[in-house]
Amino acid sequence: MHFPISLDGFIEAGLPRKSTLSLGQLLGALSHALDITEGQPEGHCVRCCWIGLKVGQKLGLGEARTRALYYTLLLKDLGCSSNAARICQLYMTDDLSFKKGFKTVNGSIGQALNFVLRHAGSDARLKDRVSTIFSVLKNSDEIITEVFETRCNQGAEIAAIMRFPPDVCAAIASLDEHWNGKGRPNRRNGQEIPIYARIALMAQVVDVFNIEEGSEAALREVRARAGSWFDPEVVRAFEDCAKDPDFWEVLNSDSLEAEIYAHPAANATMDVDPTYLDEIALGFARVIDAKSPFTHGHSERVAFYTDMICAELRYADPHRQWMRRAALLHDIGKLGVSNTILDKPGKLTEDEFAQMKQHPVLGFDILSRVSAFHTMAHIAAAHHEKLNGRGYPYGLGASELTQDMRILAVADVFDALTAERPYREALTLKKTYEIMDKMAVEEIDPQIYTHLKAAVARSALFGA
């Protein structure tokens, strides 16, 4: 099997020192990654953007404020991966389905209790499930605050790394605040909540209920939460939008994504120097590695080992920098894998492993949406391929694996063995080399592996 896009003309070289990056492409790739992390149907953030922009138009937001609203709506879930592991731990359930379902809970005691009874401990034995439900109910306020605080703060920090304006970062940090002061994480109320956050929260609820139950259900839900969750003025603006049949027709159409990315805010292009591309890659990497405690720092370490190998091979600085970015982004597809699989302490079942093997495919789909990352998408998708053709997801053989692909594969294996995993402790350098010695020739490139060992020997790593 081959890559879904031809490798003809594939170039192993860094990007030019300066290029242009479409903001629409970047935000589109980000929003797609965030949708799968939240367990939402594809296009959730795009639909929220349409809803929110129409509401903002009714409220008379000017050009600058509309641009900030646009960024907020597409990036609202930037911190969503950071609470996935904690949700699995606290509720003993699949984080993706939990998050998807949680967005329909309106905060009433009865509905919240029903949700907990349905979801908490759903993957556990009866005894453990009862214990989990009791613990969740007893500590619900503390748990919810912790989960939302982690998500909101992480999202704001990542947006700042990516150079989005302070008002956008502040709005992302306040996404789950409610008009009546009973939201999270800081219990802000009324006008204290940034207007972009007020619009984004309501747009999110509209999309979830529209997808699940239709436009009338969405309208009923928003009206029911006016004055509690939502700013009444924002609700009135939405009601005005909802009267127009074209609003719902476009929202539910296949052309919506193209329309959102044709928005003036999306058409802006930025001069992209190498430093800014690095910051974008690092921001993505923080989203990826926040997904699981066992992947914390993984992408940055793989980037470090990749760079060490590239230095041994005397790669030019621009190419080394490009390879570091590819390494930072290589695992972005794991955002679509449940933490019940990523953090499982035992051996994966056949079905679980099949789901795990899809993460390079998901990663390719995300990265290939950004022209500046298009070639990187091929590199990232191949990090679990083997020279003997027995890797995944495409079963590529030695003749199809470029040197850059082989470098990333060796760096990834090295970190996987020397880092802690849910099913074992981190291995010593000696044990790591024993395993990799057996992999050389058949699975990983022996020359690349030799360069890694030389680089490690010259460094202060592992007491070498």
Image (spheres, grey):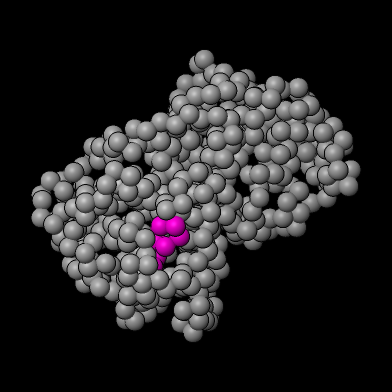
Give the x, y percent position of residue 7: 51, 20
Q: Residue at x 66, y 44 (%)?
A: 300
Q: Residue at x 76, y 22 (%)?
A: 314
Give the x, y percent position of residue 34: 43, 49
Q: Looking at this view, name the residue that lies furthest to the top.
A: 9
93 in relation to 65, above or below: below
Q: Residue at x 88, y 47 (%)?
A: 463
Give the x, y percent position of residue 35: 40, 50
Give the x, y percent position of residue 231: 26, 67
161 in relation to 178, above or below: above
**Residue 79 visible to an observer of this rendering:** yes
Q: Quadrant of residue 243?
A: bottom left
Count the numbered circles shown.
0
Q: Quadrant of residue 316?
A: top right
Q: Nearer the viewer, residue 269 or 464?
A: 269
Lateral position of residue 129 relative to residue 70, left or right: right
Read off the magenta span: 170-177
114 in relation to 437, above or below: below
**Residue 105 visible to an observer of this rendering:** no
